[in-house]
């Protein structure tokens, strides 16, 4: 853990996953072995938020996992 970086624990399909700093749900899910479909996301470029395919439900609302 890096000093000064906030760690948040989220549940992805019932599995606890630690998310550090500005890591997206999309990246955290991938690291946890869960693939979220996407057409426009590229880790080298970041999120373009155009395709809408990576929608996930968080706290009862729907969000794009590439930017949440």
Image (spheres, rainbow, N blue to C red):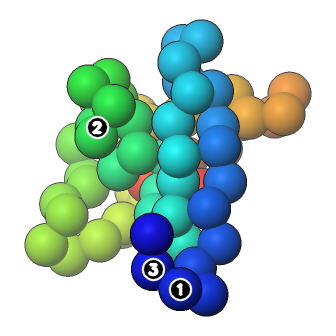
Does residue 52 appear anywhere in the picture? no
Position of 50 with respect to 55 (left or right) is: left
Q: Quadrant of the N terminus?
A: bottom left
For the residue pair 19 and 2, the one nearer the viewer reads as 2
Q: Tell me the SS state at disc 3.
A: loop
Residue at the spot 53% in from the left edge and 46% down from the top edge: 18
Can you name the residue that lies furthest to the bottom here? 4
Who comes first in sequence, dot 2 or dot 1?
1
Which residue is under mark 3?
2
For the residues bearing labels 2 and 1, Cβ distance under 8 angstroms: no
For the residues bearing labels 3 and 1, Cβ distance under 8 angstroms: yes
Position in image of residue 52 (x %, y %): 46, 42
Position in image of residue 25 (x %, y %): 50, 47
Q: Quadrant of the C terminus?
A: bottom right
For the residue pair 13 and 18, the one nearer the viewer reads as 18
Which residue is under mark 2?
30
Q: Quadrant of residue 33?
A: top left
Can you name the residue that lies furthest to the left here? 44
Residue at the spot 25% in from the left edge and 53% down from the top edge: 40
Position of 61 with respect to 52 (left or right) is: right
Would you place residue 53 above or below residue 41 in this image?
Answer: above
Q: Tell me the SS state at disc 2.
A: helix
Position of 62 with respect to 61 (left or right) is: left
Which residue is under mark 1?
3
Distance Cα–Cα, label 2 vs label 3 = 21 Å
């Amino acid at each position: 853990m890096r000093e000064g970086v906030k760690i948040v624990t989220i549940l992805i399909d019932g599995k606890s996953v630690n998310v550090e700093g500005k890591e997206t749900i999309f990246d955290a899910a991938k690291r946890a072995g869960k693939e979220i479909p996407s057409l426009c996301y590229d880790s080298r470029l970041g999120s373009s938020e155009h395709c809408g395919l990576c929608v996930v439900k968080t706290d009862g609302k729907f969000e794009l996992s590439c930017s949440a």
